[in-house]
Amino acid sequence: MKRLLVSVVTLVTALGVLAGCSDPTGTGDDSGGPIVVGSADFNESQLLMEIYAEALRETGAEVRTKGRIGAREVYVNAVRDGEISVIPEYTGNLLRHFDDDTEATGSERIHSELRARLPDGLRVLDYSSAENSDVLAVTEKTADSGLRSMADLGGRCGDLVLGAPAEWAPRWKQRISELYGCEFSEIRNLQAGSVRVRELTEGRIQVANLFSTTAAIDRNDLVTLDDPKDMFPAQNVVPLVNQGELNDGQRKVLNRVSDQLTTRDLTRMNRRMSVDKANPRDLAEEFVGGLDL
């Protein structure tokens, strides 16, 4: 009888220890160990990683960073498995990762569909107005000729050469024809953004596919064409988090970052990294220090 009582006590104690090691409510209050903030393998993601990490340190949390993890397939699994607590993402591309057939283009709809399609263990927080989306850019001279919107392309496309990555034509050639009646005279495959900018400013192409936070846009006085029919889906910056890794206060502080981060902020900091060779962590400390958290 005594041995039976000892066994029962031992079992109850063991179960209590296991329960104490988990966080079934998903609040993150009992996660233990440091918060790990990751990044994809490019500079802007590394900058956002440092911004999130610095903001989380403001809550008193122990925070580590793990940068340049690799492709989306790799780091999404790392977040889901708890190896990474949080990583900066882009709403449109993340939704397409989980639903390649989505037709959502606007920020609100993309975010709503994304939340509905995330697998168990993953969560997105509030998205930021800051985004790094596809844009078509022209020189100021071309813009002054009456080309300031993709709606202005129409019959002019037959005289325009577009510089874009190889994957642009299969995805967007038919779509831009359907929405804007645009069929470029040529789509020249130019993988590097720096090459596309040079070809544009030197007049060998008339339109370049770039990203909205490309520092060279402001540096070269380029003009990005409005997209009134939302051909390009929104790509708002959003934290992707493991469901059980952060507590309410930590999620709140990341939402406060999203509320105050703008595309202009990202563009300015990207420029300082590319032109001035500024350190991402230094930029993050400076930026977070000026936020209302």
Image (tube, rainbow, N blue to C red):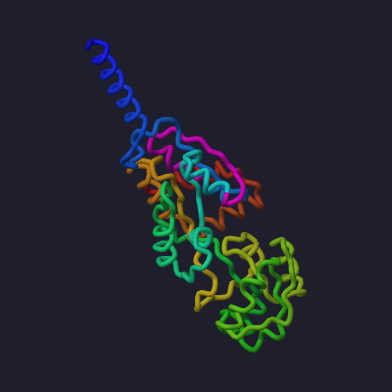
Q: Is residue 214 above or below residue 8?
A: below
Residue lying at the far top in this picture: please name it.
2
Q: What's the residue at 22%, 12% (across, down)?
A: 1
Q: Position of residue 273 (x, y in %)?
A: 62, 50
Q: Is residue 176 above or below residue 14?
A: below
Magenta stretch in the rendered image: 51-73
Q: What's the residue at 42%, 57% (across, down)?
A: 127
Residue lying at the far left in this picture: please name it.
1
In-image side of 5 versus 254 (left or right): left
Q: Is residue 101 magenta?
A: no
Residue lying at the far bottom in this picture: please name it.
155
Q: Position of residue 85 (x, y in %)?
A: 46, 41
Q: Quadrant of residue 249?
A: top left
Q: Position of residue 99 (x, y in %)?
A: 50, 63
Q: Nearer the viewer, residue 110 or 53?
A: 110
Q: Position of residue 252 (x, y in %)?
A: 35, 47
